[in-house]
Image (cartoon, coloured by chain):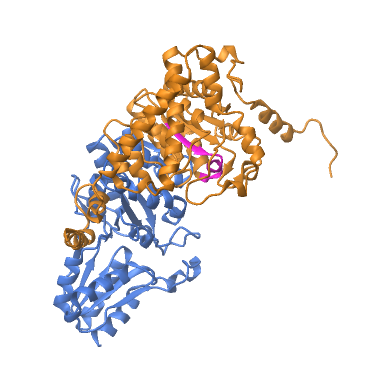
């Protein structure tokens, strides 16, 4: 087994699926010769040719339309939106078209499109490069939305996404691209979509998170452990649909939960998780379910990022409120 | 202010030169006479009669659809009268294997491409079965978002190209649609990939109420193709032969690997924008209406065919009768469609397994709808 960063695992997943299915096409801005601005498609054009891995003109809406049209010809497009902050340019193609393809055609057509895109804060980008806009996607029926937090998961989830017959939005956290390595099998493997992963077991509190916040939550859990609290951490991995079963089983065990997201608090994934828990497990709860999230401003200028982004200390603070309620 | 230097590139003159090149292509004048012998496609008698039949049939379909809408027996409907040559002569140049990505006014083309009429009526009524296209009929449901079909056409065309098929993707929008970003992205993508697409702008002079001259400073919409590197043509959209030839040539270039074409068809919609309360008298004068009625595509094609001895009142009556009969049958068939259920919509959302949230709701609606 090879040690891989998340970006390497993503490239590996793309290579695996380009090899596995000749209908898989990888395209976007600068994904060809340049290998993508983060090198996610490094070497793929050379290996599979310009017919299957190609650059497009610089227009996100056009990339979305291209993916839809190609899927109507039986292809399995894997377009890249260079930064997810640019998603506003392709909103109609995603929410107005892609997500409705099967519904609109009464099931005659489907759109096996996986849109990959980097997002997430903490790396001092210019504006519109770091926003957590995932709830724009989860609010749209018809889409599956995936956010991996480790190299191993990234590969397995991306393979599953590409093989899925419905549109998948695959969001890759910028800060996780090269933050650590882990063992990633060289062969193809799938991680089922819609299944959360219990990263750490515990008895006193459940922390539910996704993306970079999984790591902040794990760090918080370790610290809390030192203070005598046994904390369970769940990585959602797929944020639409949410693996409610795993969450409820955990909350029924611990009786306390917090939900952590990097995005602003308003109308977020965490709110959805809290609602699901209260609807289904209120009698198991010993305390209110609290959220850790960024404040309700637009994504800040890089100089304010440090305080704005939730971190393990914020997670600990909220965890303690719930633990001592 | 610098003094005028004759060596400086005269951008204004370049623009004027480009714009002046876009003269309207016409073969058949308003009297039904061939004025452009060289361009005459020399369609066979059968083909000429078939094209006339389709235009007459579609005019009746439009009249009946409007009246059915007024009776509450049809829903959403965008009238087509006046655009028959633009719609049906362009379609006449296509082959079965070609793909059509229509706007919401382009129901006639997809019907003549193979969508059963009862399905067109179900689409109008808002029943999902209207969009369930039969196998082998290469059309999408009419697009509601103006211009979205343009970028998708670029994708379908690229797919056709990658599959090595001898076919094209044809898409339609209107003069208003040519202002959308997706219009530019669509023609630009197809141009960059040199893929087999035909982009048709049916310039019917008004985007709902906004006149063509408020859409753009460009003298023609056809010239917009130049910026994307597309061969582009301005054609008399009331002249079936000219529209046919422009589309035929575009198709030929496309399947020969020469890339996409932009066609602007100058036409007019006689009716309102849709049947949902639009009142054209608020933005058009009867003088303009009358002026365009003189150019009517059916009138001039009828004259042309009559002069050739290919058409007469009897033939026309027979087509009208056939249209009325088939429309009646199609309405009956549409009436017989089962009532649609929320559970069916849920089933259609995803191919394969439903996500867990929907699965749960499915059970609730299954119960509700079983009562």
Q: From which residue to which does the magenta span run?
A: B170-181
Quadrant location of the C terminus of chain A? bottom left
Indicate whether residue B97 is drawn in magenta: no
Residue B91 makes an appearance in the image: no
- Looking at this view, is B154 or B130 the one in front? B130
Give percent across and percent down for residue A162: 26, 45
Give the residue at x 49% y 20%. B249
Residue B22 makes an appearance in the image: yes
Instruction: Note whether A82 is above or below B137 in the view shown.
Output: below
Would residue A196 appear left or right of A294 to someone viewing this image? left
Most extreme residue toward the bottom is A325
Give percent across and percent down for residue A220: 27, 75
Q: Colour of chain A?
A: blue
Give percent across and percent down for residue B190: 46, 33
Indicate whether residue B179 is drawn in magenta: yes
Quarter of image, res A284: bottom left
Give percent across and percent down for residue A208: 25, 70
Q: How many marks?
A: 0
- Looking at this view, is B230 or A59 the one in front? B230
Quarter of image, res A163: top left
- Looking at this view, is B365 or A268 the one in front? B365
Q: Colour of chain B?
A: orange
Instruction: Note whether A119 is above or below A314 in the view shown.
Output: above
- Looking at this view, is A313 or B265 the one in front? B265
């Amino acid at each position: 087994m090879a040690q891989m960063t998340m970006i390497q695992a993503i490239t590996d997943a793309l290579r695996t699926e380009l090899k596995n299915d000749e209908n898989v096409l990888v395209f976007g801005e600068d994904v060809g010769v340049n290998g993508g601005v983060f090198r996610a498609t490094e070497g793929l054009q050379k290996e599979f040719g310009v017919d299957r891995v190609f650059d497009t003109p610089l227009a996100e809406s056009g990339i979305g339309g291209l993916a839809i049209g190609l899927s109507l010809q039986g292809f399995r497009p894997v377009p890249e939106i260079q930064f997810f902050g640019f998603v506003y340019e392709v909103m109609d193609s995603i929410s107005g078209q892609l997500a409705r393809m099967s519904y609109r055609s009464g099931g005659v057509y489907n759109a096996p499109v996986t849109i990959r895109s980097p997002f997430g804060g903490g790396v001092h980008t210019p504006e519109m490069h770091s926003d957590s806009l995932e709830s724009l996607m989860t609010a749209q029926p018809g889409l599956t939305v995936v956010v991996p937090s480790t190299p191993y998961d990234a590969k397995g989830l991306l393979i599953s996404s590409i093989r899925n017959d419905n549109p998948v939005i695959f969001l890759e956290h910028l800060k996780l691209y090269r933050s650590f390595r882990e063992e990633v099998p060289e062969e193809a493997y799938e991680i089922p979509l819609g299944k959360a992963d219990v990263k750490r077991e515990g008895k006193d509190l459940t922390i539910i998170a996704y993306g970079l916040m999984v790591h902040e939550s794990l760090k918080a859990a370790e610290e809390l452990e030192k203070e005598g609290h046994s904390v369970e951490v769940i990585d959602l991995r797929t944020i639409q649909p949410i693996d409610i079963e795993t969450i409820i089983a955990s909350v029924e065990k611990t009786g306390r939960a917090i939900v952590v997201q990097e995005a602003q608090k308003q109308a977020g994934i965490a709110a959805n998780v809290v609602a699901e828990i209260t609807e289904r497990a209120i009698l198991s709860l010993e305390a209110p379910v609290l959220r850790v999230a960024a404040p309700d401003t637009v994504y800040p200028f890089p100089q304010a990022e440090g305080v704005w982004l939730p971190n393990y200390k914020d997670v600990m603070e909220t965890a303690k409120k719930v633990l001592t309620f | 202010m610098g003094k005028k230097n004759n060596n400086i590139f005269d951008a204004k003159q370049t623009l004027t030169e480009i714009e002046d090149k876009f003269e309207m292509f016409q073969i058949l004048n308003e009297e039904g006479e061939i004025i452009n012998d060289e361009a005459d496609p020399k369609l066979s008698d059968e083909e000429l009669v078939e094209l006339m039949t389709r235009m007459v049939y579609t005019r009746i379909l439009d009249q009946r659809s409007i009246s059915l809408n007024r009776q509450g027996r049809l829903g959403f409907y965008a009238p087509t009268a006046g655009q028959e040559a633009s719609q049906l002569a362009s379609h006449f140049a296509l082959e079965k294997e070609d793909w059509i990505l229509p706007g919401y006014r382009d129901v006639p083309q997809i019907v003549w491409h193979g969508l059963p009429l009862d399905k067109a009526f179900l689409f109008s009524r808002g029943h999902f079965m209207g969009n369930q296209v039969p196998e082998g009929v290469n059309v999408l449901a009419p697009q509601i978002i103006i211009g979205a079909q343009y970028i998708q056409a670029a994708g379908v065309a690229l797919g056709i190209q990658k599959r090595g098929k001898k076919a094209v993707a044809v898409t339609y929008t209107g003069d208003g649609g040519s202002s959308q970003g997706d219009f530019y992205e669509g023609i630009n993508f197809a141009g960059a990939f040199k893929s087999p697409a035909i982009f048709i702008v049916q310039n019917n002079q008004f985007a709902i109420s906004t006149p063509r001259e408020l859409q753009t400073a460009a003298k023609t919409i056809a010239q917009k193709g130049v910026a994307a590197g597309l061969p582009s043509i301005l054609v008399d959209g009331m002249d079936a032969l000219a529209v046919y030839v422009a589309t035929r040539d575009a198709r030929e270039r496309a399947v020969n690997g020469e890339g996409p074409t932009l066609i602007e068809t100058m036409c007019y919609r006689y009716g309102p924008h849709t049947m949902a309360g639009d009142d054209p008298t608020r933005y058009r004068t009867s003088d303009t209406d009358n002026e365009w009625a003189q150019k009517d595509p059916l009138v001039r094609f009828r004259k042309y065919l009559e002069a050739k001895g290919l058409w007469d009142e009897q033939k026309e009556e027979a087509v009208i009768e056939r249209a009325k009969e088939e429309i009646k049958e199609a309405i009956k068939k549409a009436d017989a469609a089962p009532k649609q259920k929320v559970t069916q919509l849920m089933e259609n959302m995803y191919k394969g397994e439903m996500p867990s949230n929907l699965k749960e709701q499915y059970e609730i609606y299954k119960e509700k709808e079983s009562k």
